[in-house]
Amino acid sequence: MSDSYSLGEVEVSLSPLERFEEFLQSRGMRCTEQRRSMVNYVFSHHDHFDVDSLIERLPRKSEPGYVSRPTVYRTLIEFVDAGLLRCFELDGRHVYEHDYGYPEHDHCYCEKCRKLFEFHSEDLLALRDKVGKDMSFRVTGHRLIITGVCQECASQNRRKKRKQDLL
Amino acid sequence: MSDSYSLGEVEVSLSPLERFEEFLQSRGMRCTEQRRSMVNYVFSHHDHFDVDSLIERLPRKSEPGYVSRPTVYRTLIEFVDAGLLRCFELDGRHVYEHDYGYPEHDHCYCEKCRKLFEFHSEDLLALRDKVGKDMSFRVTGHRLIITGVCQECASQNRRKKRKQDLL
DNA sequence: TTGTATGCAAATAATTTGCACCAAA
DNA sequence: TTTGGTGCAAATTATTTGCATACAA
């Protein structure tokens, strides 16, 4: 095992668990069974997820690794504080995604299938900083969501329309 | 009175009430006391607002123009459908702002005072369309929020720090 | 008159909290 | 042994809904 850890596309020197342990130490918090379980399950996929979909993947009650719903909420907040996850709101619920070891990006959101598609734009970062300068605003971050219809949903619509035309 | 109506910076040919009445007609909905009252209060300010702050401005129960909370929610949805308001989520609640007769814009959000500052960027629209093209995504809209600290809050911090330095 | 709209109270949904018990360091 | 952590049940918050009544067209 090398001394660096690859997640997505960015090289980082610690695994998510190691980094989280460091965070816990620095705050006098404990590395519990539940926290370790959460790290395992959250960082074994790179999808976006909400609390419900995470709990579906987590072990059930009475199985090893089970984490209660309140603790899931509490631990996700810790992950965000630790810089492991980012969180945003979509359709009235919190959505989480990997931050640590994962390249910065923004999203297109399909209003039909409700899927998120990632993209990265250097121009956006430049634009963001320019706006900050113009407005004397000290920028710490941003969130851009482009809404619309993804290719797949758009072509499904077209297929349906063609069928209707034949009737 | 001229036959065009100026709100913010964009000229439109109908007042918000007239436009809403048109919308209601087209859907076989009725122009009620409550809907008229809401139009009055919502379009007499240009601020961002959430349901609670709107209800604070609205007449109290037993006063003329009173609208019950469920009807406030229902009517705001109608305003959005009618293209009079836009809605987005911030800190777990719905925030509304004028759309009709108001120029397209995005926001800087100060994490200290939680105020929203508007800006407009043509570059952003171009960027948005380019991303859509690159990703074969049919763009219908976007939402950009730049987070950080506004000038006022930043300078307050500096003042506090200076004072602390003197102790 | 006829169905849409409203207010009330109750239901939902997502998230948070109080607290007695449990366990990491 | 000493705090911090957890699960449970209950509380909160924002929003939505069912339904009997009220009212616009």
Image (cartoon, coloured by chain):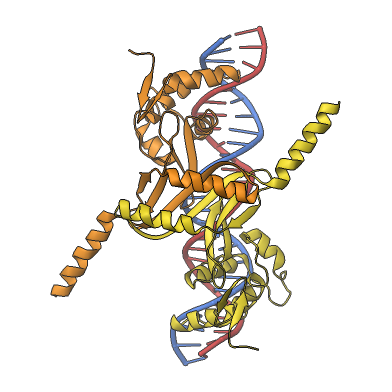
Chain colours: A orange, B yellow, C blue, D red
Looking at this rendering, what residue extends furthest in the right direction?
B167
Is any atom of residue A62 visible in this view? yes
Vertical comparison of B145 with A73: above or below:
below
Front in this rendered view, residue A11 or B23 = A11
Q: Position of residue B148 (x, y in %)?
A: 61, 43
Front in this rendered view, residue A16 or D10 = A16
The residue at 67%/68% (across/down) is B45
**The C terminus of chain A lies in quadrant:** bottom left
Number of numbered discs overlaid on the protein picture: 0
Vertical comparison of A150 with A15: above or below:
below
Q: Does residue B4 appear left or right of residue B128 in this picture?
A: right
The residue at 58%/63% (across/down) is B97
Q: Quadrant of residue B62?
A: bottom right
Q: Does residue B103 appear left or right of residue A137 in this picture?
A: left
The residue at 59%/47% (across/down) is A132
Front in this rendered view, residue A7 or A73 = A7
Q: Position of residue B121 (x, y in %)?
A: 52, 57
Q: Position of residue B54 (x, y in %)?
A: 66, 64
Is any atom of residue B32 visible in this view? no
**The N terminus of chain A lies in quadrant:** top left
Vertical comparison of A22 with B64: above or below:
above
Q: Quadrant of residue A29?
A: top right
The residue at 67%/64% (across/down) is B55
